[in-house]
Image (cartoon, rainbow, N blue to C red):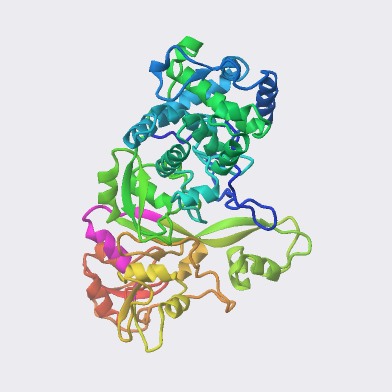
Amino acid sequence: MISSALFLSGCAINEKSDYLATKDGNIEGAADNDINDPDLKYLSSESDADLDEELRALSETGEWGEDTTITGVEQLFDFPVVTNKQVEMYLNLFQTSQRRSFESWLARSGKYVPFIEHELEKAGLPKDLVYLSMIESGYSQRAYSRSRAVGLWQFMAATGKQYNLKIDSYIDQRIDPEESTASAIAYLGDLYKEFGDWHLAVAAYNAGPGKIRNGLKRYQVDNFWDLAQHKYLHLETKRYVPKLIAAIMISRQPERYGFTNIAYEEPLTYDKIQVEPGMPLDAVAIISGTNVREIKALNQELRRGKTPPNKVGYSVKIPAGSRSLAMSNLDNLHSYVSTGYKTHTIKRGETIASICRKYNLNTTALLKVNNLRSSNLKPGTNLRVPYPMVKYQLLPDGDLSNLAAYNDNLILHKIQSGETISKIAKKYKVPQNMIVSWNGLKSVHSIRAGQQLALFIEDANKSTSGTRRILASTSKLIIDQPATSALVSSSGAIPTLTAQKKGLPDEVSIPSDYNWYKVQDGDSLWTISRRFNISADSIRELNNLKSNLIHPGSRLIIRKG
């Protein structure tokens, strides 16, 4: 099972040159920190101090490729391992000043090496290429270089897209270990087909195939070491091959080089489950019986904390062994829109109007939430600012009585000619896709005049206690955040959805075997029917109610028990 902790490391900076630059000089595909989680930020792939140390040591090794020999233990490797002054420099560096970084890489290798080796073997590529990811990223999925290469394999955006990695505002598959490994294997296979030499192929992976291709042609050479003797490749690129070879040699026999008692991480394992578009990761955590931090760690490629809304379905990763639980819970997942609160500290010169514009609120709502009778504001005072937030819960399996409580909030809307889901959503101040989910519609366009829509909307009067909710009665409800709150209105008033009848006035005479009951905050027809051991239908009929909506303070006729 994947750990949610991520580590900074001294990883290799990618000097790939085959990126695309925009007109303003920015590199295409620059990733943003879209997930508001400190453990899931992009991580710097190498410190300046480590880079300076490497380049200084390399410059002191003299001519490149001199006395290059095949190691005497080549049977341990399926990558062409050689020794020379540059390789020996890295062997020494990893055992001394960069020992701590290399120990971290080895520890993290336990998570990724088994999976990547399996994929390399299936593709017929050398399994030693698994350590290419080590020197690229230090096995950090969110490693991010100064040239804006990202992920375990440090793909630039252009190359990643060329090798079928999806990169947009919702997802960056360069961070997905499974997808990025498949693309890296395909890329390395193509490079080997072109150059017929693994040293040249991995050099091209770093520098770009065009750079290597042009160098071989210019200097009439056919191998990496002869090309490296010329002042054609940057030293940052030249270091790539000897660094990989040294990493392979130590990683395959760590004890020989003094790396003992390494606490290798457990191999990365997970299950997958197909979910609907736009499902937030906190909902995935609920159905899989874990916490959202673990789900985020397993799905770091998702940049907005939810599955892509622009895909028909998405295979989200969940903890190993939890697929059966998640599948069974999916049918019992219910969502509701609640009102959360953030704090705004009043600044000098701010007015109620300017604050309302900033948060798209109406004045009445903001004054009511803060129990203010005047719009005069004092700088430094804190205001509570309401905002809509989507929450999730699981209903007990097979317990239909729980749904009865939800159905007490039912409103039936008959679609008129010319009405759209958009117009209806604005009228009732609910998100369009909730209406779609509540009614099992295929899309926002699949409605017709005369059709009745079910809306599950709790009494907006309860918003004074901070508990206004829009409730869902259907399973597998997926909604985009943020939702539209009934507290937000362009009309300047808090909208209230009321029943067609609030109950009969207490002046009406009633038989002696009946009582008046005053509706309390939190009551529903279902809870009242349970309390007095009568049916909800009877209460509706006695009180001339045309829906299940009731309001605190209303009076109802109840038959004596």
Left/right of residue 228 with respect to residue 408 in the rendered view: right
Residue 65 seen in the current view: yes
Residue 405 location, quadrant: bottom left
Looking at the picture, does residue 134 appear above or below residue 390?
A: above
- Tell which residue pokes out farthest to the bottom in this image: 417
Q: Residue at x 47, y 31 (%)?
A: 197
Percent of width and height locating residue 267: 37, 30
Q: Is residue 317 magenta?
A: no
The stretch in magenta equals 392-411
Residue 15 location, quadrant: top right
Percent of width and height locating residue 162: 48, 51
Quarter of the image that includes the C terminus: bottom left
Quarter of the image that includes the N terminus: top left
Residue 409 seen in the current view: no
Front residue of 311 and 91: 91
Front residue of 412 and 499: 412
Looking at the picture, does residue 253 appear above or below residue 449?
A: above
Front residue of 387 and 330: 330
Looking at the picture, does residue 510 appear above or below residue 366?
A: below
Q: Is residue 394 magenta?
A: yes
> How many numbered marks appear?
0
Percent of width and height locating residue 289: 34, 43
